Amino acid sequence: MKYPSLRHRRLLLAALIPALLHGPAQAEQTRLGDVVVTGAALDEELNRTAVEAEELRALRPVTSDTANLLKYTPGVSLYGAGGVSSLPVIHGLGDDRLRVKVDGMDLISACGNHMNAPLSYIDPSSVERIEVFAGIAPVSAGGDSIGGAILVESAAPEFAAPGEGTLQKGEVGAFYRSNGSARGGHVAATLANESLSLNYRGSTAQADNYKAGEDFKPAGLAAAGRGWLDGDEVGSTMYKSTNQSLSLGLQRDIHLLEFKVGVQDIPYQGWPNQRMDMTRNDSTQLNLDYEGDYDWGLLEARVYQEKTRHAMQFHDDKLFWYGSNSGAPFPDGEPCVPSAGMNGCAAGMPMDTDASNRGVRVQGEIPISERDLVRIGAEAQQYRLDDWWDPSGKGMWPDTFWNIRDGERDRLALFGEWEARWNPAWLTQLGLRYERVEMDTGEVQGYNATYLADATAFNAADREKTDDNLDLAALARFTPADTRTVEFGYGRKSRSPNLYERYAWSTGGMAMRMVNWAGDGNGYVGNLDLEPEVAHTLSTSIAWHDANQTQWELKVAPYFTYVEDYIDAERCSGAMTGECTATNLTRTDGFVYLQFVDQSARLYGVDVSGHMPLGESADYGRFTATGLLNYVRGKNATTDDNLYNIMPLNARLAVVQEVRDWTNTLEVELVDAKTDVSAERNEVATGGYGLLHLRSSYEWKQLRLDLGIENVLDRFYNPPLGGAYLGQGKTMSGTGVPWGVPVPGMGRSFYAGVTVQF
């Protein structure tokens, strides 16, 4: 049996409170609602969407990217990145603007391109449950974010039932996807008695470059002597990833203790919208979690540590080999001997980061009365980062370039939450969170005297920064009838700048292009004067559904957010050196150079989701229609420019057939043209498109088989958030694929997956 988590016990308590308040008749009504398999009637979490195990099992064979498991969640879209490293976006706010926790750990991307995003540290096969708080997240779900929270959980420890003896179970799975020849598998095993549980999980995924639906560029060499790319091949989309974890659970009386060790090895991962690729990502995670169920309430405590060693370089499809003056590439194997000045050669451009992330969290949950529940807690996080680039010639020598040196970002938070069940119709939640963020960095240096002016100015500046941030979340749910639910709320959320936004210091073109997690090909420089972002969000949702919330539902959820000191970017020029010239201000095409600045922003939109039965017969089974529509609009309120990377109107419509042991799905994905683009960044517009997908799964005893075709008609399309194509050639000098080519989406792909439990 599984030891019930704090969340499940909290939901059970919330389900019992109406019975205690209203006597036996109400208790019988509550019990009838509680037998629903989906658990919707039990869910007391406000403003929350859960992706449960059954939906996750259907998505795992389709992707090796955990962020892709969120693509059916209302309000969520994805920034394009590496094959296992997409960045989730909620209502137009993504990346560091979201609080993303993996098994309770606040993971941080230790890279100037954000290549090692938090969700890249867990394989889809290890994900048991995902909770998404869109826009307004409870203060207990985390701070230092303005767009919402994503909480990803792996399976909880399992123990043998009393008298069962020894529990032994396991799972083996494998998948193959034709486009890019993606392949991989996973294994899991559990050995447990009534008080001790040992679990191992391992997974691996590997893929070559994928193909678009048609040619989008001329065919040619990826890089001198390194291979040929066809016109439809999307360069730098290959990857290889391995994840392993070993956990030990101990259960006794009211206590549950779990200690987990996780290890990741990514030897390479291409980036089609960055000038560099990941050539190493080694991570070790230690995670100790305690849960206790005391007479006074529930206690949870967690301590974790993550160590990351990350490297970037040019992989097979990209090039940085130059001859003297001419810029002609050296053939493979010819030695590169650095020489003085800019007339040397460069054996690539090694870039390294070393990061340490430690955290502790304590939370108590106390039922004050049958009506009131209080949560109080504290969190602390200590983050250290070094980002350096060893000399390699061609002007990148003789010294080591320090992009971030002795970077520090520490957080200390206190929070309290009051949840009240006033009567069966009303549930409210009010939370307050105070967070102190302290940041600092050491002195920096460039490769040589070319970078001296910027480095001197930065080193002379006051680099120690302290932010005092205050968050407020007020949410309510009104259930006027058993077929209608209304939620609404207001949130004030804050986020301090990350280390790169404040401390990236060089205005040299090459250095600026290495600080870019936007995937737009532009270069960025930091700003020591940045203030924390403060977002004010109003949201509501109205849901119509059947009484048991199992047959049909239609949910409409509009929202509005205004952000003070929104960290956007403006063209750099004037007193700065390097690429921040007057010419940079007037470019209307090509890549540009920008500085992070405080401005203001408005975002608004609506999410519509639902499902309904279409019919049922003995021969053909049960048919269900599902639908999802998202719309968001983002404007810079200071400049009236459009915000960058805003997903246009999009929808997913599907018909699902369940007949005996088979589940078959026909899905249509529709995306409008992206025409509201950021002029400041020279963002490229993309066209609208429609895709057709077919999926089928078969379950028999311990066997599950998944088959399907993604993009059945092999349509060519450009994902609106895919970024600028930089997947091949001399990406640093701009002589690869010309500016203005967006990263194309994947063409037709057949997939198959099999999972066996034992």
Image: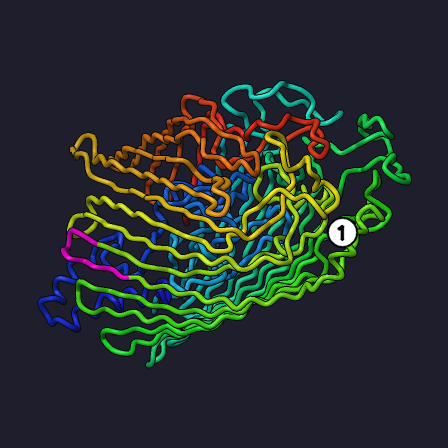
The residue closer to the viewer here, 497 or 582, is: 582
The residue closer to the viewer here, 251 or 613, is: 613
Residue 226 seen from this side: yes
In the image, taking residue 151 as reference, residue 396 lies left or right, namely right
- Residue lying farthest to the right in this orientation: 340
Residue type (three-letter) at the residue carrying disc 1: Asp
Near mark 1 (Cα within 10 A), the count class, few <14, some 14-19 or many ≥20, is: some
Instruction: Indicate yes or no whether the magenta region holds residue 477.
Output: yes
Q: Which quadrant of the figure has residue 707? A: top left
Residue lying at 14% horizontally and 55% vertically, measured from the top left: 481
- Residue lying farthest to the left in this orientation: 25
Q: Position of residue 587 (x, y in %)?
A: 62, 32
In the image, taking residue 239 as reference, residue 629 lies left or right, namely left
Does residue 78 sit above or below 28 in this rendering? above
Majority SS type along the magenta span: strand
Q: Position of residue 85 (x, y in %)?
A: 54, 44
Quarter containing the N terminus: bottom left
Does residue 152 sit above or below 196 in this rendering? above
In the image, taking residue 55 as reference, residue 732 lies left or right, namely right
Q: Which quadrant of the figure has residue 75? A: top left
Q: Which residue is mark 1?
A: 454
Say what secondary structure mark 1 lies in. helix
The residue closer to the viewer here, 285 or 381, is: 381
Instruction: Indicate yes or no whether the magenta region holds residue 656.
Output: no
Does residue 573 sit above or below 360 in this rendering? above
- Residue lying farthest to the bottom in this orientation: 295
The residue closer to the viewer here, 548 or 216, is: 216
Residue 303 seen from this side: no
Does residue 519 sit above or below 410 in this rendering? above
**Which stretch appears magenta?**
476-485
